[in-house]
Amino acid sequence: MPELIYDYIIVGAGSAGCVLANRLSEDGKNTVLVLEAGPEDKSSMIKIPGAFAYFMFSRKYNWRYETEPVNDIRGGKPIFCPRGKTLGGSSAVNAMVYIRGHESDYDHWRELGNEGWGFSDLLPFFKKAETNERGGDEYHGDQGPLYVSDTVNSYPLNDCFIKGAEQAGYPLTNDFNGPNFEGAGYYQFTIKDGQRCGVSRSYLKPALDRPNLNIQCEALVQRLIFDEKKAEGVAYTKAGQDFVVKARKEVLLSGGSFNSPHLLMLSGIGESEELKQHGISTIHDLPGVGKNLQEHVDACVLVKSKKKDGFSLSPRGLGRMLPDTLRYLMFKKGNLANSITQAGAFLKSNDGVQVPDIQMHFVPLLFDDCGRDARLLSQHGYSLHVCVLRPKSRGAVSLRSANPEDKVKINFNFLSHPDDRKTLVDGIRSARKILAEDAFSEHRGDEFHPGSDVIDDEAILQKCKDRLGLVYHPVGTCKMGNDDMAVVDSELRVRGVERLRVIDASIMPTLISGNTNAPTIAIAEKAASLILNAGE
């Protein structure tokens, strides 16, 4: 059998990998192989924006990670960590919110020594990726592959939230990605013509007919192949067969914040002592691999509704879904054509904060445990979720074994830093303030979580821990930088080895103030530019 060789091998067809596949194969000069562990994105459920909760239960399209249990969090049960496992990665299963974060997030990266990664450096790549239905301007693009649209509000409760925030004294904004980041308003989404517009649809599908691009699904990469400290290719399995493929130029890891460090460690790149414990020979001692894990910890206020005009799995709620389902099937309109997370806010938890440090997601239903609590969903109510935007707590991803099919251990170390605990409790107080305003007077029933009798800080914190969740934004495990714990440099090249880069959310040195899908796409756009310019 002849040896297979490509110019670039991309491991992972997620939010970064699909962008790289498109851009690196665009001019026809490079041969590109993409290896995706999941299946093709053939499910019709992927296309339906309002059906994204379906994937919380899917075993086919979801990696279904879980954290290591912590005694005082969720009663000692693991926290569920969904990640997309198909073409498009998590952009195929997420809530489609389009958020970039605050300008200072990226300027902070540059201040840490990562030249070329300030907001002014990344803005052209955000714009390059985007076609905003409002048109192009100083902050937005109008010719990119990724379609960004406004939502059509179908739930009166969303308006109650916006009005309640205004009554509580918070500012309003009509564009979280424009000059006014702070405030309450409606999110924009990666939705086009009533269907999800993730990176598979926007970047990968238009490139599939290129003869220099090869996509292999259900291909699990086992390890990277090195010649001393030079990455030469990868070994992978598909349909029970083993394959080896070589890279003429570079291997690019885009597996995300769990899978990219996992593959590095399996391949002998990581902390030597940890690798030794699992019988893995060290190619390069790089102690930062898997460390610096960050995520948006999430807590909620749950309130029962008197008007019962939100979403629920009650007989009444299910009955109301039938005509809406028909409307979607016929016209791609209605609730199923939109995400359920339509309204939100970026607010300051106290007067001493300069940049908003909490994000809120309002949903017109009772939502906990990633929507897997059917008993809760069968009741009528609404939820206001609060996350700590720039956490100081740091966790880690570590090996469970040397078997590539064994998932990594995940320890977020949530709320280990006292500032995170204070910010979260202050955020819950801000949420309660909004929900107590007159805007909700016709809807407001009992607050049953944390509970109206829970008022002191320690009690609120423990109640938060009892239902603690996350916002599906893991980053940082292959961080960019030049200190001893950095994994990649400012061109995303793995430090200490050759011809290997990591290009995904794992390279973020610090978590940005918002949803991470749009920044991951911008990272990949910039990385593609770096790679192509380096090859000239």
Image (cartoon, rainbow, N blue to C red):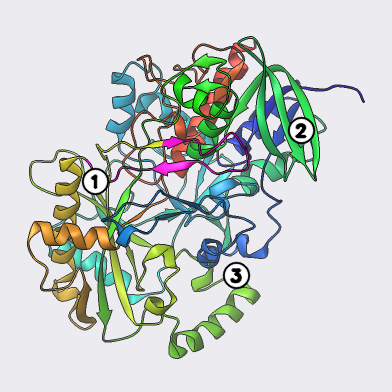
Secondary structure of the residue carrying numbered label 1: loop
Asked if the residue at tag 3 contacts the one at tag 2, i.e. Cβ–Cβ closer than 8 Å, the answer is no
Secondary structure of the residue carrying numbered label 2: strand
The amino acid pointed to by label 2 is Leu
Q: Which mark is residue 375?
A: none
Give the residue number, with chain letter if any, for mark 1.
415
Q: Which is more N-terminal, label 1 or label 3?
A: 3
Front of the two marks 2 and 3: 2
Q: Which residues are magenta?
A: 397-416
How far is disc 2 from disc 3 in space, using C-alphas? 32 Å
The amino acid pointed to by label 1 is Leu
Horizontally, residue 321 falls left or right of residue 390, namely right
* Front residue of this view, candidates 257 and 462: 462
Residue 17 showing in the rendered view = yes
Please tell me how crowded label 2 is: few (under 14), some (14-19), or many (20+) other residues with Cα within 10 Å. Answer: many
* Front residue of this view, candidates 316 and 372: 372
Query: Is residue 291 placed above or below 185 in the rendered structure?
Result: above
Instruction: Give the x, y percent position of residue 7.
Output: 73, 20
Instruction: Give the x, y percent position of residue 187.
Output: 38, 56
What residue lies at 65% left-to-right and 47% top-to-bottom?
Answer: 87
Instruction: Give the x, y percent position of residue 45.
Output: 62, 65
Instruction: Give the x, y percent position of residue 77.
Output: 37, 59
What residue lies at 45% left-to-right and 16% top-to-bottom?
Answer: 489
Q: Which is more N-terminal, label 3 or label 2?
A: 2
Q: Which mark is residue 213?
A: 2
Secondary structure of the residue carrying numbered label 3: loop
Give the residue number, with chain letter if any, for mark 3.
332
